[in-house]
């Protein structure tokens, strides 16, 4: 008998958990290598997890709707086709309670009921088997805690040196060493602050719902978008700068090439690839806009990976990424943009295609909006918004004097994180964007 533990693979940068949306195999089913076992969903994309081995599915450790951390074991396959014996770490909370209802729950329960960031259960009565979920713990940390019989209450009190107070392996080993020597550890700062802070109950907003109104639940993607947007506003100091752009040269070029391109490539030639190219060039001019923040450190990204907001048929949003846009030709950007946008609308993107962005673009003009102040897509620090292109009478400066002419004008904005990007840098970056669009080579071929 040989048991193989199936784990949630790495699903992309910053993704730490996934929701099991549908089991594709049942316990007792025979599975071949590369067979899909389960469908999962993250805040960015839905996908299937295939089996890397052949055998019998003997145990499903999570139910549909459960949140599972990346790296956690979610199923066991007997590669010899026999019934598997679960390791101690996979015993359910209920089974642990039956064995010892008076014992404080330890990290052993985590494998069956993973801790999810943002969820906290009552710790005041440990005999009930509930536990704290104030921090996410890696599988390695959980394994060490299990071996050392460390409870969640004790684990939550250990100060972490990782990002966002994440508890690392070395933090836990140092704690164990100090505990053996009788040294009192420094309390987790987040736990101390939380304990000392006054508890303010959220004030419920009473609403009267008329009989003709109806109430519907947000779908999973909308809930995740809402959480992501609120978190971004709470994290970054948002500032937005605006400028008008004379799109004459870009419009002339597109009008001249769109029909031939559609006939040759069977694809539409839109303005979006031109905006992507302009952002890549402006980032080259001002690389300190292409950054992210890690505590008090600024990460300057070498690659220019531009996220492109795509509206889905159900009015939700997804942001596929044009990687290394600064290295692509305009034709290469056009092909990439069309491919990602098409597959985004039919849910055919893979996790790597919606992660790793360093700066984003949202095209508000496709819906007739003139201008907007978009929210930064964390952990990025800048997002460009373009509005609708409208013909307007504008003043044109010439060597022979000023004149009034009709021009296609577009409002463009840049929202940036004022923690690391000041108005001077944000303004210069926006000036660079405008310059690259207004001096666009309308004689180039594609």
Image (cartoon, rainbow, N blue to C red):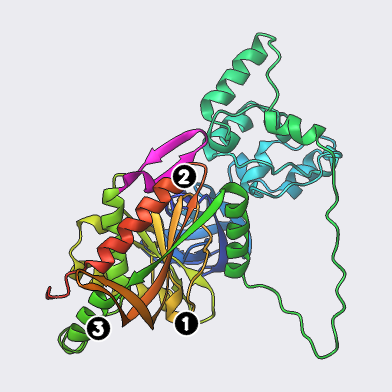
Q: Residue furthest front?
A: 401
Q: Residues within 10 Å of mark 1 (few under 14, many from 20)?
A: few
Q: Where's residue 165, x and y in %?
A: 60, 34
Residue 2 shows in this picture: no
Q: Give the magenta part as a residue range.
A: 286-300
Residue 22 falls in image quadrant? bottom right
Q: Residues within 10 Å of mark 2 (few under 14, many from 20)?
A: few
Q: Is residue 160 above or below residue 61?
A: above
Would you say 207 lies left or right of 61 here? right
Would you say 31 lies left or right of 184 here? left
Would you say 68 lies left or right of 386 here? right
Q: Is residue 380 above or below residue 35?
A: above
**Which mark sits nearer the N-terminus, 3 or 1?**
3
For label 3, the residue is 267
Q: Is residue 36 above or below residue 389?
A: above
Q: Residues within 10 Å of mark 3 (few under 14, many from 20)?
A: some
In the rendered structure, are the residues bearing label 2 and label 3 in contact, judged by CB atoms less than 8 Å apart?
no
**Which mark sits nearer the N-terminus, 2 or 3?**
3
Point out the frontmost of discs 3 and 1: 1
For label 1, the residue is 368
For label 2, the residue is 422
Write the residue at 76% across / 80% down: 215
Q: Where's residue 56, x and y in %?
A: 47, 60
The residue lying toward the viewer, choosing from 100 and 307, is 307
**Which mark sits nearer the N-terminus, 2 or 1?**
1
């Amino acid at each position: 008998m040989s048991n193989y533990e199936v784990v949630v693979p790495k699903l992309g940068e910053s993704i730490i958990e996934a929701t099991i949306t549908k089991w594709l195999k049942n316990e007792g089913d025979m599975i071949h290598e590369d067979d899909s076992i389960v469908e999962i969903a993250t805040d960015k994309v839905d996908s299937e997890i295939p089996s890397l081995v052949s055998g019998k599915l003997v145990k499903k450790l999570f139910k549909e709707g459960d949140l599972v951390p990346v790296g956690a074991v979610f199923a066991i396959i007997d590669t010899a086709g026999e019934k598997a014996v679960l390791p101690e770490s996979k015993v359910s909370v209920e089974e642990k309670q039956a064995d010892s209802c008076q014992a404080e729950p330890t990290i052993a329960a985590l494998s069956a009921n993973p801790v999810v960031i943002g969820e906290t259960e009552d710790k005041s009565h440990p005999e009930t088997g509930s536990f704290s979920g104030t921090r996410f713990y890696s599988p390695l940390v959980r394994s060490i805690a299990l071996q050392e019989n460390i409870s969640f209450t004790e684990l939550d009190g250990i100060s972490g040196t990782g990002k966002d107070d994440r508890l690392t392996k070395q933090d836990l080993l140092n704690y164990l060493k100090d505990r053996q020597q009788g040294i009192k550890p420094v309390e987790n700062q987040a736990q101390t602050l939380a304990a000392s802070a006054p508890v303010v109950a959220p004030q419920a907003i009473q609403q009267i719902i008329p009989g003709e109104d109806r109430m519907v639940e947000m779908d999973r993607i909308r809930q995740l978008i809402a959480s992501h947007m609120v978190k971004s506003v709470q994290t970054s100091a948002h500032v937005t700068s605006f400028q008008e752009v004379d799109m004459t040269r870009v419009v002339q070029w597109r009008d001249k090439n769109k029909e031939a391109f559609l006939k040759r490539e069977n694809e539409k030639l839109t303005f979006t690839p031109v905006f992507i190219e302009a952002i890549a060039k402006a980032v080259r001019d001002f690389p300190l806009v292409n950054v992210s923040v890690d505590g008090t450190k600024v990460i300057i990204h070498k690659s220019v990976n531009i996220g492109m907001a795509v509206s889905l048929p159900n009015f939700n949003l997804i942001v596929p990424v044009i990687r290394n846009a600064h290295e692509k030709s305009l034709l290469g950007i056009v092909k990439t943009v069309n491919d990602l946008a098409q597959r985004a609308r039919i849910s055919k993107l893979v996790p790597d295609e919606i992660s790793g962005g360093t700066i984003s673009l949202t095209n508000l003009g496709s819906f007739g909006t003139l201008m907007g102040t978009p929210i930064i897509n964390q952990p990025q620090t800048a997002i460009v918004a373009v509005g609708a292109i409208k013909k307007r009478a504008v003043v044109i400066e010439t060597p022979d004097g000023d004149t009034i002419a009709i021009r296609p004008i577009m409002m463009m904005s840049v929202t940036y994180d004022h923690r690391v990007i000041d108005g001077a840098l944000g303004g210069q970056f926006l000036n660079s964007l405008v310059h690259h669009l207004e001096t666009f080579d309308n004689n180039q071929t594609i």
